[in-house]
Amino acid sequence: MQLAQRLDRVTEPQTIKMAKLSRELKATGVDIIDLSLGEPDFRTPQHICDAATQAMADGYTKYTPVAGIPELRQAICTKLLRDNNLDYKPENIVVSTGAKQSLINAVLCIINPGDEAIIPTPFWVTYAAQVSLAEGVPVFVPCGIESDFKISAAALEAAITDKTRLFMFSSPCNPSGSVYSQAELAALAAVFEKHPNITIISDEIYEYINYSGKHESIAQFDSIKERVVVVNGFSKGYAMTGWRLGYIAATKELAQACEKLQAQFTSGTNSIAQRAAITALLGDSAPTADMVRAFTERKDYVIKNLARIPGIKINMPAGAFYAFPDISSFFGKTDGESVMNSAEDIAMYLLHKGHVTVVDGAAFGSPKNIRISFATSMDNLIEAIKRIQYALGKLA
């Protein structure tokens, strides 16, 4: 069988690869602490689960409209106005099977072959792959730890060409945890005002995992709102990863385009999950606040103790649940058996010698870093940091 050439444009995500290696080692009896996946270790709140049970009892088990059930699309509009002061109507909303599908829908509806998409690094691993699948050209703008991994207006302006059609970013950011302030977004918006052919995809899936205060969306600026695609979902803020629910808020024209595309892929997403999502958006938010408090405690512990390891440089994440240390000072060092030539080498070394799973930063466009998820118990984190400190201490 001859497979399609488009498969050559993508590789297996490093996050999934490392989780797979972790499971394989665990199966052989090795005690592995997995800090590779971005998945809250909390259960979905009970009132949301109860809503799903009630939906089944009430017979909500049939096909749904492609763009989502009307009640959920209205609830999303209510949420956007309540939390973000963004005024959208249900016709602007498309519900999909996860925010990842929301992203690829939008990318495929925007990018033509040869179009350029600016992606500040570090970035979530899927952005570049999706642009490549659409036969577009990812244009990476490096943003290092010295700028808190955020793109400046000047760097954005310098990257724009007559082929630029898309800008993709996340705030809070996976993997760096960086959060853009209103002033920083306003500076970017001022650049976009001068370039009306560019659409902005704003991935806000970590909105509620925010340690810096109020979440700011780039869609708040009226001068560019019509060109912003807000992407969000339920996996992070409501611990609903397995429910597979995401959505976009965009212009009616783009929403209809995404609906048309989705109709040929998945049609409407899960009916029961959609009914539960209404409760998530409009119901008790206390479980989310409790979860963020736990993440805050873990963040403070992880960052403080990673910063104590000689050779590590690290920023203070303002959102999400990752640490993204620069470990380039260890390049060229050895434990006497293997030489650490890259972040991938260090990730594999920590897996096999430290028995801790992390992700190579090169997967996110930052080859000097590794990503460490603190979406696990404090006991696991305490032991994992000890193992990382010991393993890195053996390198000379």
Image: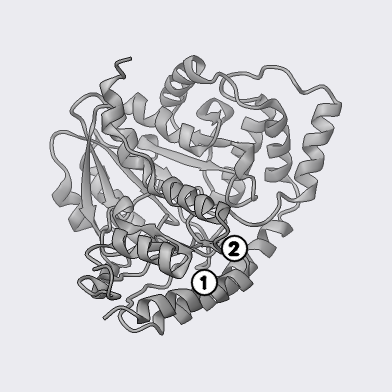
Left or right of 226? Residue 165 is left
Above or below, 278 against 313 in this view is above
Q: Which residue is mark 2?
A: 376
Q: Position of residue 284 (x, y in %)?
A: 75, 52
Q: Quadrant of the C terminus?
A: bottom left
Q: Position of residue 269 (x, y in %)?
A: 61, 26
Is label 2 in contact with label 1 (beta carbons under 8 Å)? yes
Q: Position of residue 75 (x, y in %)?
A: 66, 37
- Numbered label attached to residue 384: 1
Query: The disc labelled 1 sits on which kind of residue?
Result: Ala
Left or right of 314? Residue 31 is right
State the separation of the CA atoms marked 2 and 1.
Answer: 10 Å
Q: Quadrant of the N terminus?
A: top left
Above or below, 184 against 301 in this view is above
Q: Residue at x 50, y 68 (%)?
A: 212
Q: Looking at the image, which is closer to me, 315 or 84? A: 315
- Numbered label attached to residue 271: none
Q: Looking at the image, which is closer to me, 9 or 256? A: 9
Query: The disc labelled 2 sits on which kind of residue?
Result: Thr
> SS of the residue at dot 2?
loop
Q: Looking at the image, which is closer to me, 77 or 40? A: 40
**Quick check: can you spot residue 61?**
yes
